[in-house]
Amino acid sequence: MTIRSREPHPAMDRRSFFLGSGVAAGTVWTGALTAQLIPTRARGAEARNPTNAEVLNAQTQRALRWAGRMPADWVRARPGVDHNVMIVGGGQTGISIAYALRRKGIGRVTVIDRCGPGEAGIWRNIARMHQLRTPKWLPGPEQGNPDLGFRAWYETLNGAAAFDALDRIPRLAWADYLAWFEQVTEAGVRYRTRLVGLEPAGEYLRVHLDSEGAQRTEVTRKVVLANGFRGAGGVNVPAILRGVPAHLWSHTDVPFDFSRLAGKEVAVIGAGASAFDAAATAIEHGAAAVHLYSRRRYVDYPAPGVAQVPGSPGPPGDRGHANVVELLPDLPDEIRWRNWRARESRSATVPPDSLARAVQSKKFHIHLGSEWTAVAPRSQGVSAHIAGKQRRFDHVIAATGYRVDLSAQPELEVIQPTIARWQDRYRPPSGEEDATVAQFPYLGAGFQFLPRPDARAEYLRNVHCFNMAASASFGTLVGDIPSVAQQPRLVAAITRDFFVEDVDPAQNRRYVEAPIVPPSPAPYQSAVSSS
Ligand SMILES: Cc1cc2nc3c(=O)[nH]c(=O)nc-3n(C[C@H](O)[C@H](O)[C@H](O)COP(=O)(O)OP(=O)(O)OC[C@H]3O[C@@H](n4cnc5c(N)ncnc54)[C@H](O)[C@@H]3O)c2cc1C
């Protein structure tokens, strides 16, 4: 299949969207297919067909033009305020929300990320699967503009058949796509800038930033926490590993040089998708043996052909639902509580290809119903007590996920004592108590923190939490691709707050009471009838 521009070849201007990382995107994902797609006849300066990257460039410019220019910033500037919205995190969530807010005419939206350019998010560092776990057709950050979606990007570079042939989205293609999306939507992420503190400042918020080692203080009206799965309490480290020297174990969420495991006996604690990906990566880097330990007596993976029943209340049966996900927060507290309890008690299902990637090796061993009860460092490696037996390993990988504990986030130190948790707002029936879910913040409908009943912390309505901590309130993992469907709630809430707060009663009165001065009748005077 050949993609050709239906329009005359557009001149590439200096602001080509494919300057910089976009070129890298094209080169990574066009490969052999591009060779087929670019016509083989002479590519003279005058008569050549555009490359796929050029077609994408033209198509994207056209899509942005047809979407209409970015609305002018209508939010009233306020003295002493640097930003209308500061978004913390330049991963897929942060750049998506930034684009949506700017399409609403909200200016001075600033995205910060502690990482350097190209390093934000998880896709090039701690994610180790070959393909995304979610279906390839889910809507992403494009905010309803399909020309900015993954499919348009991928098909234009590689051909429709190439997209059709994908099982799921290749992980690095998703990373390249996000880099492109960031560029074409001009997200303008301020890199190497970390939020280190947040506090009220009258009716605004003061943010303390570490910007390449320099400390800065700025003022914003709103903060959006888009700081990822580990941004609401960090990683979950089993108590038995806490005293073990750091070089003897690692968590899957931390970038790690797997070549260090060559020739080693490795243990993986956990049986979710990341556990299998880490096990396979260790084997592919030459580990002598990898033993995966599951407390449960089974490994959870999606049953083939079982689809989510549309409209069914409760957590989705798979991660390809999307149609009703935005309605989950409207369920009563009782149902949301039960749903999240049920979700917490399950491990992330393992895609069949991740399962097969590890299982195909004879060096890989699964131990079901095997709880670790103690670990002790030895002269080499560790000794572990598992289900009544002692085992020795050179290295342990904790694939134990994340936790939600706002008190563990240093940047929230000042505000977190005032934030309402589920335990402050909902009392479960006897037998349904759950200390883990009780710690999740109980969020308002716009993802804003709410104050604890006894706290005078009105300012919390300006701190919006779009990370894992929002999951109990919103009924699905918040931050993953399916949860993009929830972003319009947050965007609408922020837009509404600015719109309502910016009403100036005096100006409004002047407007409604202004005498009506009819314009000159000259343009229609000749047709005015006197009868
Ligand atoms: C291993 C793994 C695989 C996954 N696979 C899938 C999948 O296949 N499909 C799917 O839908 N979801 C998947 N997810 C879930 C989710 O899509 C990803 O976690 C995704 O990266 C979330 O995007 P995000 O932008 O919310 O957060 P992140 O991508 O984590 O980005 C957060 C950003 O915030 C920055 N940051 C954090 N704290 C600060 C601070 N204080 N100051 C400034 N910047 C800060 C970080 O540097 C980071 O760049 C996966 C998650 C994991 C962990």
Image: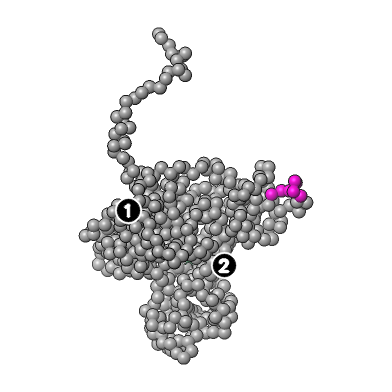
Q: Residues within 10 Å of mark 1 (few under 14, many from 20)?
A: some
Query: In this orientation, which residue lies closer to the viewer: 10 or 302?
Result: 10
Q: Is residue 21 left or right of residue 92?
A: right
Horizontal side of 507 relative to 53 (left or right) equals left
Give the residue at the far right of this rendering.
42
In reply to whether residue 81 is colored magenta, the answer given is no
Q: Position of residue 229 (x, y in %)?
A: 42, 65
Residue 29: quadrant of the picture: bottom right
Identity of the residue drawn at 35% across and 51% down: 80
On the question of residue 513 being in view, the answer is: yes
Q: Residues within 10 Å of mark 2 (few under 14, many from 20)?
A: some
The residue under label 2 is which amino acid type? His
Per the image, the residue denoted by label 1 is 204
Label 2 vs 1, first from the N-terminus: 2
Residue 500: give its label. none
Residue name at image x 68 percent, y 42 percent: 8
Extreme residue toward the front, this view: 214
Label 2, label 1: how many angstroms apart (C-alpha)?
Answer: 44 Å
| Magenta residues (range) | 44-50
Q: Report x, y in % for residue 107.
A: 43, 47
- Relative side of 48 to 225, left or right: right
Provide residue 220's location: percent of width, then percent of height.
Answer: 37, 54
| Quarter of the rendering containing residue 370 | bottom left
Q: Which residue is mark 2?
A: 130
Name the image quarter holding residue 228: bottom left
Which residue occupies 25% across, 60% down? Answer: 452
Q: Is residue 153 above or below residue 346?
A: above
Q: Which is closer to the viewer, label 2 or label 1?
A: 1
Q: Secondary structure at mark 2?
A: loop
